[in-house]
Structures are given as C-alpha cells and as structure tokens.
Amino acid sequence: MKLHIAVLPGDGIGPEVIAQAVKTLKAIATEYNHVFTFEYGLVGAAAIKKTGSALPEETLELCKKADTVLFGAIGSPQYDKDPDAKIRPEQGLLGLRKALDLHTNIRPIIAYEDLSNKSPLRKKWIKDVNLCFYRELTGGIYFGEKTWSNDGNTASDTCTYTRNQIERVAHSAFKAAKSRRNKLTLVDKANVLASSKLWRKVVMEMALQYPEVDVNYLYVDQAAMQLIINPKQFDIILIENMFGDIISEEASVIVGSIGLLASASLGDKYSMFEPIHGAYFKATDKGIANPIAAILSAAMLLEHFDLHEEAALTRRAVDKSLQLHITTPDLNTKYDNISTSKVGDFIEDFISNPEETNLN
Ligand code: IPM
C-alpha cells in the first residue's frame, strides 16, 4: 500500500516520540513492502516561532493533501504565563480538528498485566481493564462562542451541540460497542446542562436502532469516581468534548502512565493519529519521554487503513518491550538507562525480526 503521511511533530517531546513512531512505520513498510512517504509540517509553538501562526496555511494544506496525519504534541510553558495571549500553540491542534472536521476521537484504555504494579490502583481492580472512549472532538464548550465584557471582568464560553454532531460520534460508538462487549455508557451532566439533555435524548432514541447494545447513562461526576473504583464495568464510553478531555486523562492512572495512551481522531474525510499526552516541555531532549503512546498511535493508523497484521505486529513489539522492561523511566523497573530512542530501536528490531529480538 502507498501512504503519504503528514507528520506534525509539534513541541516539547513531540519530535522525539514522533521520530520513534516514524521509525516503526518505516520498519513496517520494509517488512510488508509498503511505500510510506513522510512529509513534515510545523504546528504549535514551533510554528508560531517561525510563522506567527500556530497552524500555518501550508501545514493545513499538507494535511489535506496527505492520506493521513501523524501528530506529536503541542504546548509551551511560555504561553501559560500570559492568560491574555492572543496566539497559543493549542490553536494549532484545535484548528486542525475543526478544519479537518475530526469529530470522533477514539482513546483506548488497556491495562497491561506487566505494568499492574505501576498504577496506584489495586491490581485486582485494574486487571483486564479494556475500555475505549469515543470523545466528540469538534463541538461543545471548546468551540462555542467566547465573550469578554468591555471592562474585562466577565467572560463566558458557550457549550453548544447539535443533533447531527451527537449522532455522528454516537453511531461510531454504538458500532464499536457491537464489535466489542455490547456495552455503551453515555457520560453527561443531564441533571444540569441543556446540551447534556440533548445528548441523552438523542442517544436514548438511537439506542432503539442498536437493541443488542446495553446502554447506561452516568453523570460525569459519578463517572469520575466509577472509573477509579470499578473501571472494569466499562466497555465503550461515549462522551462530549470537554468531559472527554478530563475523564480520559484520569483513565491514564489505570494504565500506569499517560505515556502509553494513543488516540485516533477521525472525520468523514480526514484522519489524524496522536498520543494523548502533551508536550511535557521539561523533558524535552532528555531522552526520557515514553514513545509508546506515539508508536501505538501509529498502530491505530495502520488499523485505520486495514493493515491489521502490521498493526498486530507493532502491538506485539510494544508488549514485548514492556515485558522485557525496555521502557523509559516513567515505567522502568529494571534498567535505568533506557532512552526514548532505545525503546524505538527495540521496536524497530522486533518488527524486522520478531523471533530474535532481545535487549542488547
Ligand atoms: C487533548 C489535549 C487538548 C484538548 C489540548 C492540547 C488543546 O488536552 O488532546 O486531550 O484539550 O483537547
């Protein structure tokens, strides 16, 4: 298969982890005779520095003409000190999600047996957790009207959802539930918010089209607690944009490190794959950033293009690296000098030679 991939490494640890994901994809291409080409673009603080915009027109064009997008991370502490900043790195990511209409964000949370001692939660609660968020990504409070009063003392963000926005992500979530354990939980705040009431109404109606799926409804405050005390009860969690941002990050506690969590952002025409973690600026160029989230995002990219065998091999390589403790310091138990690129090298070697790869 030929794939032209737009690569947007972004800021902080983004470039380091994306380099490992690209290394992985190149190894897969070699093994399976695919032709993957990579074209790089600027986004986030790196783009602001060079062009004044967090999402330069050139980058957007690159993403539109590519078959898909591999995204690293964005953010820089420089902007956090100034709440009045008009241009922020995050505009790059939000602008891409909107411009490419990437409405469905899929975030799998899978507990690894080998890492069960890395979570602060008790082993028996997290063993076998396998849930997946379907987060709406282009609506809600993130993209609603924002206003400031003239005196600067009142500000508002509007949370708006349309039936269509809810239905498109919900259909994907229901279909995913059908292919898994037939369980879907809608997380909302329908006891208070009008937009949540619409979500609940629409999902209740849609549930009739998916009779085999057991649908549950949970307020977001309850969900925050249930996710920690009994995460195994969940299969698919359908959730609006901001609640999804918060609750999915909470879920990283189950797995043991946010450095393991990958995601796919899908629209009707475009797709983008990115680790859930941020730019982790403090760790830039120290070789301590965990590349697994980026590598697993590459695996999701392969699955998206129906390269299932290739994705499975990538996942096996990741499993093996965890089993052998070939991991960065956020997870490491045995060795203390395993760098970001060393993890990438191991995964690359495993893909080329699955039977023989060991730490050397
Ligand atoms: C995420 C991030 C983004 C979000 C930021 C960087 C804008 O936290 O992908 O979860 O809030 O959606």
Image: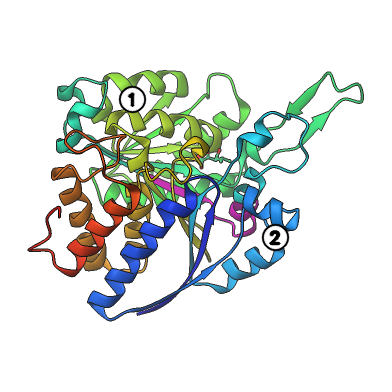
Q: Is residue 8 magenta?
A: no
Apparent side of residue 322 relative to residue 247 in the rendered image (left or right): left
Residue 264 in view (yes/no): no
The spot of residue 168 in percent (x, y) is: 50, 52
The residue under label 1 is 227
- Image coordinates for residue 39, horizontal then vertical, percent: 52, 71
Q: Position of residue 250 (x, y in %)?
A: 40, 28
* Residue at disc 2, secondary structure: loop
Mark 2, Cα crowd under 10 Å, few <14 / some 14-19 / many 20+, is some
Residue that numbered label 2 is attached to: 56
Q: Is residue 88 visible?
A: yes
Please name the amino acid that badge 2 sits on: Pro
Cβ atoms under marks 1 and 2 closer than 8 Å: no
Quadrant of the image occupied by residue 353: bottom left
Q: Residue furthest left?
A: 355
> Which numbered mark, 1 or 2, is in the foreground of this view?
2
Q: Nearer the viewer, residue 333 or 86?
A: 333
**Which label's residue is closer to the chain start, 1 or 2?**
2
Q: Position of residue 129 (x, y in %)?
A: 22, 34
Span shown in magenta: 95-107
Mark 1, other Cα within 10 Å: few <14 / some 14–19 / many ≥20: some
- How many numbered marks are there? 2
The quadrant where ligand 1 appears is top right
